[in-house]
Image: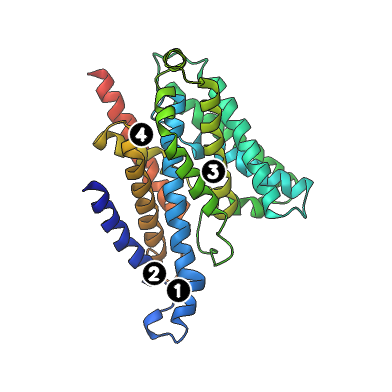
């Protein structure tokens, strides 16, 4: 029943996304071409990115054992942007596949470094982890900005650090299907991620290869993040607020909640993208900016709610 409701809402949003735009397709002779070349690829890109980022956030929260972290604000997204910048400077003629591989590699290294830092933090202070994540991500972002400034690539870097879908056309979003495949694979082994979330001692006692599953989870998160950054740019807070809301409403069973998380992520990002198109019509606001504003407010509310709960 819950999935049926989510599918119905998502179907309505998809329909709106296909008809909202500067060109009125009902009065244009090239309506079919506009739908096939622009509107449909854009809608699919938003749906895939939203679902994949939300699921990646849920998995990262389980691996780190903290509900207030997500890839785009904990260094993974910034590491992917650093990888794209490094590929541009070191291998300027490299194909998109090479840039994706380098972005995914640096995203994974950034995630591993963040995980190493979280293990040194006191478990009695759970709010320290998201604060460290924000500082860590901002530090990597500062490095990216400084290098871009020194090499006169600030405008180029802005493309990767500001998520938006206005440039999505047929033939320019297809790498996101790889992110969709990785998301499905993560769902297949979601039970193992849930066991890892219980801690290393419990995981080992249950016969699970804790370190291997942890590495697989971070690799999946890094690939999804890198593909999203390379294709449409950084979109913060999707992997933070959506898993938290779904968890509060439906519990922490990953096998049961990951499909709901994917639908909520896709729907939330699609609604933000439609809003980005109509707020200053006929101009567009980057969807990363729209969801960033909404997500930051929700993030502060989640922190406040957590603080109130702990106080009581």
Point out which mark residue 225 bears: 3
CA distance for labels 1 and 2: 7 Å
CA distance for labels 3 and 4: 20 Å
Is any atom of residue 256 visible in this view?
A: yes
- Earlier-in-chain disc, 1 versus 2: 2
Helix or strand or loop: what does disc 4 sit on? helix
Q: Residues within 10 Å of mark 3 (few under 14, many from 20)?
A: many
Quadrant that contains the C terminus: top left
Q: Residue at x 50, y 29 (%)?
A: 133
Q: Residue at x 44, y 81 (%)?
A: 31
Q: Nearer the viewer, residue 282 or 216?
A: 216
From the viewer's perspective, is 305 left or right of 292?
A: left
Rendered position, 21 above or below 128: below
From the viewer's perspective, is 279 left or right of 33?
A: left
The residue under label 4 is 254
Rendered position, 87 above or below 199: below
Rendered position, 308 above or below 202: below
Point out which mark residue 35 bears: 1
Q: Nearer the viewer, residue 298 or 208?
A: 208
């Amino acid at each position: 029943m819950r999935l049926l409701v989510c599918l119905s809402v998502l179907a309505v949003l998809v329909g709106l996304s296909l008809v909202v735009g500067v060109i009125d397709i009902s009065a244009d002779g090239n309506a079919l071409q506009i739908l096939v070349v622009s509107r449909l690829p854009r809608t699919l890109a938003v749906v895939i990115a939203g679902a994949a980022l939300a699921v990646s956030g849920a998995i990262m929260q389980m691996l780190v054992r903290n509900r207030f972290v997500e890839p785009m604000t904990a260094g993974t997204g910034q590491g992917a942007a650093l990888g794209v910048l490094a590929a541009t400077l070191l291998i300027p003629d490299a194909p998109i596949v090479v840039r994706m591989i380098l972005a995914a590699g640096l995203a994974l290294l950034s995630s591993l470094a963040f995980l190493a830092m979280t293990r040194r933090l006191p478990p009695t202070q759970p709010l320290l982890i998201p604060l460290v994540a924000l500082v860590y991500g901002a530090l990597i972002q500062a490095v990216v900005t400084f290098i871009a400034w020194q090499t006169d690539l600030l405008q180029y870097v802005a493309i990767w650090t500001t998520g938006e879908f206005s440039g999505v056309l047929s033939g320019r979003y297809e790498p996101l299907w790889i992110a969709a495949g990785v998301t499905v694979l993560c769902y297949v082994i979601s039970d193992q991620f849930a066991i890892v979330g219980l801690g290393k001692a419990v995981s080992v006692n249950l016969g699970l290869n804790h370190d291997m599953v942890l590495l697989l989870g971070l690799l999946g998160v890094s690939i999804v993040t890198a593909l999203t950054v390379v294709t449409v740019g950084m979109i913060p807070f999707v992997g933070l607020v959506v898993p938290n809301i779904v968890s509060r409403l439906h519990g922490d069973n990953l096998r049961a909640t990951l499909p709901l998380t994917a639908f909520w992520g896709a729907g939330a990002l699609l609604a933000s993208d439609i809003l980005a198109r109509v707020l200053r019509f006929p101009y567009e606001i980057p969807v990363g900016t729209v969801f960033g504003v909404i997500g930051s407010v929700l993030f502060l509310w989640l922190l406040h709610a957590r603080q109130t709960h702990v106080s009581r």
